[in-house]
Amino acid sequence: MKRFTVLLSCIATIRSQRVLLCAASFFAVALQGCTPVYKTTGDILVSYGRAEMTPYLLTYDDLDMACATGEAMTPFLVSFEAVNSNPTRLAVLTNSMAAVCAQDRALEQELRYIRAIQMGQSSEARDARTMQKRYSAIASARLYESYERSISAYGESTEKRCPRLRSDFDEMVFMVGQLNGVQALLYDAAADNSLGLPRNIAAKAAVAANCLDNKKWWGVPGGIQASVWTILPMLAPEGTDTWKLLQDAAQTGYDSGVRLSSALYAVSAYSSDNKDELRRAIRDFAANGEELNQHYAMLDAITAFMIQGISDRMWTEATGERTPFGELGSFWDDVDDPESSIDIDDLL
């Protein structure tokens, strides 16, 4: 009887070991099978992002929402590259939204720097400038990532070759990528060229702009070219009036209800220290806020952020305070129109 009990015990032990072995084999196979599951999940997210999420987000005019979405969604989406999903085109847009966060923080530090200089607070000014450069470097990196991904998705353009853009979505992504490439250079310069971005990005963006229909895309392609030519006039065709081109690009944006090209006008004037054109760009933008295309409200909000930021710099340099609420398009020294003049004492 004792021998029989021992035999049963041995058989049970063998069976349990086999069960454990089978269980281990099952989990090993299941875990190996996760990669296809993850890829499928990634493909579904990318498809959803293109078909539903992007059009929906473009109708938002809340930049804080865009900023938070960009910072949260970019690493999540890009992580699916590890399982051979392809979020590259979506990442062009999410990196662009994430850059807004760093751009806003850099602006706040720049305004703090200006005020500190005016008050003779040297330590505060140096600290603010340091933080401005840090955030500018982050903004530049995100913008450059957006640009690089647009090149990865569609390839570089040449005078004789344009990428194959199969849909309006592809055209918009390509355009945003080129625009961000130019912006990346500006923020890298603000960060003492700490990223060392290639200087030929601007020239490449100007060439790539030829691949897009200027009227269809609200004057932005023409605005990209003209803005590059204000920085690199040797690239402009002989006899080109770049400021007229920028004005025309901005007007095309106003007529279509998407004012993105006016940001190129304002930024070009600010970078060139052309005060007359800069004031005109800001006034025109403020005066053309009716009948906007709500399908692209987010792009208009980003434009407003950029132009508001320039106005805030100008106001802070002149008065120590940013643009008064609801007064974008006006200036502290307006005297021609009594109704538009600003009495600083009334703001205190």
Image (cartoon, rainbow, N blue to C red):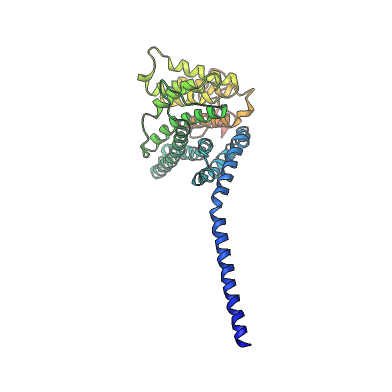
Residue 127 at x, y percent in the picture: 41, 44
Looking at the image, which is closer to me, 318 or 240?
Answer: 240
Quadrant containing the N terminus is bottom right
Callout count: 0
**Residue in the image at 41% along x and 14% along y:** 240
Placement of 121 over or under 6, stated as above or below: above
Quadrant containing the C terminus is top right
On the question of residue 339 being in view, the answer is no
User: Relative to 123, is 4 on the left or the right?
Assistant: right
The part of the image, by quadrant, that contains residue 232 is top left
Residue 57 at x, y percent in the picture: 61, 35
Placement of 124 over or under 21, stated as above or below: above
Q: Can you name the residue that lies furthest to the top here?
A: 239
**Residue in the image at 44% along x and 41% along y:** 138
Residue 17 at x, y percent in the picture: 56, 71
Looking at the image, which is closer to me, 27 or 161?
Answer: 27
On the question of residue 101 being in view, the answer is yes
Looking at the image, which is closer to me, 166 or 215?
Answer: 166
